[in-house]
Image (spheres, grey):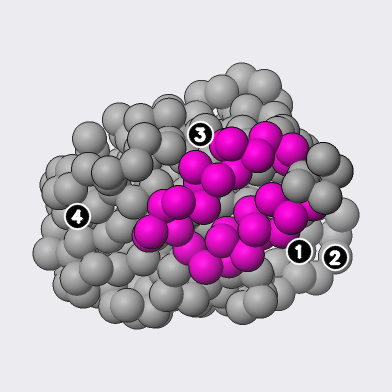
Amino acid sequence: MKLTNLAIGLPQTIRTAKDRGLLTGICKETASEAYLTADGFRQDDVADKKHHGGPDRAVCVYPAEHYSLWNEKFGCELPPAAFGENLTVQGMSEADVRIGDIFQVGETFIQVTQGRIPCSTIDQRLGHPVMKGMIETGFTGYLCRVVQEGKICADSAISLAARSKNSVSVLEANTIYFHRPEDIEGIRRVLAIESLAEDWRRKFGKRLDAALAKL
């Protein structure tokens, strides 16, 4: 496990690929160090607080390994923190990480709470239909809550502090959410995770109700 990029940034208005103005917090800048609080990094924020941010989604993480896939697929060279993630990491893919896992990063401890649900802002920023590919593959990255506040440096080490008792990986949860909305057993396994983000608990709860109604 390795931290390959640390990035923070406040919302700003950008010009999209279609030359439109968009207020967004997706454009993060590489930082040498940053202080992480329960609500997120200082000098970092989101513009759309309905769908992003909050204690359950204080930190956005994205696996570095996926960059080569998207670069090859779209014939481009994506910038650092292209997906608006705070932590770009190596050796921590969605298939390897379970919801509920706790990692130590520098002085902090963070807990994985849900997979990320990509939005069109990614495509508007990058000018490529990456969102569709992220949903198809489940390579969305994931979100975390802060268990212990502290400083993270660009060269901080990452280690697994506590393995989740459940066996649901981020990738499996993504697959159920995006591709198996009537998988009652799978949905129940996700809902059984105590550390699941409340937003995902509501979303999976609605999926379960809808699936049961069809029986």
At mark 3, the secondary structure is: helix
- Classify residue 17 as left or right of residue 150: right
Residue 137 appears in the figure: yes
- Classify residue 137 as left or right of residue 9: right
Q: Mark 3 touching mark 4, by CB under 8 A? A: no
Q: Mark 1 points at which residue?
A: 15
Amino acid on which disc 3 is placed: Leu
Which comes sooner in the sequence, label 3 or label 1? 1
For label 3, count other residues whose C-alpha is less than 10 Å away and answer few (under 14), some (14-19) or many (20+): many
Q: Name the residue under label 4.
A: 105
Which residue is at a point 54% across and 40% down the rendered structure image? 173
Amino acid on which disc 4 is placed: Val
> For residue 60, which numbered disc appears in the image?
none
Cα distance in 3D space between marks 2 and 4? 37 Å
Task: Name the front one of labels 3 and 1.
Answer: 3
Q: Name the residue under label 3.
A: 171
Q: Mark 2 touching mark 1, by CB under 8 A? A: yes
Q: Which contiguous range is marked in magenta?
A: 181-210
Amino acid on which disc 1 is placed: Arg
Cα distance in 3D space between marks 2 and 1? 5 Å
Residue 166 percent location from the top left of the image: 34, 42
Residue 142 percent location from the top left of the image: 47, 49
Residue 185 percent location from the top left of the image: 59, 36
Residue 197 vs residue 53, the one in the foreground: 197
At mark 2, the secondary structure is: loop
Cα distance in 3D space between marks 2 and 3? 33 Å
Which residue is at a point 63% across and 28% down the rendered structure image? 137
Q: How many labels does the image show?
A: 4
Which comes sooner in the sequence, label 1 or label 4? 1
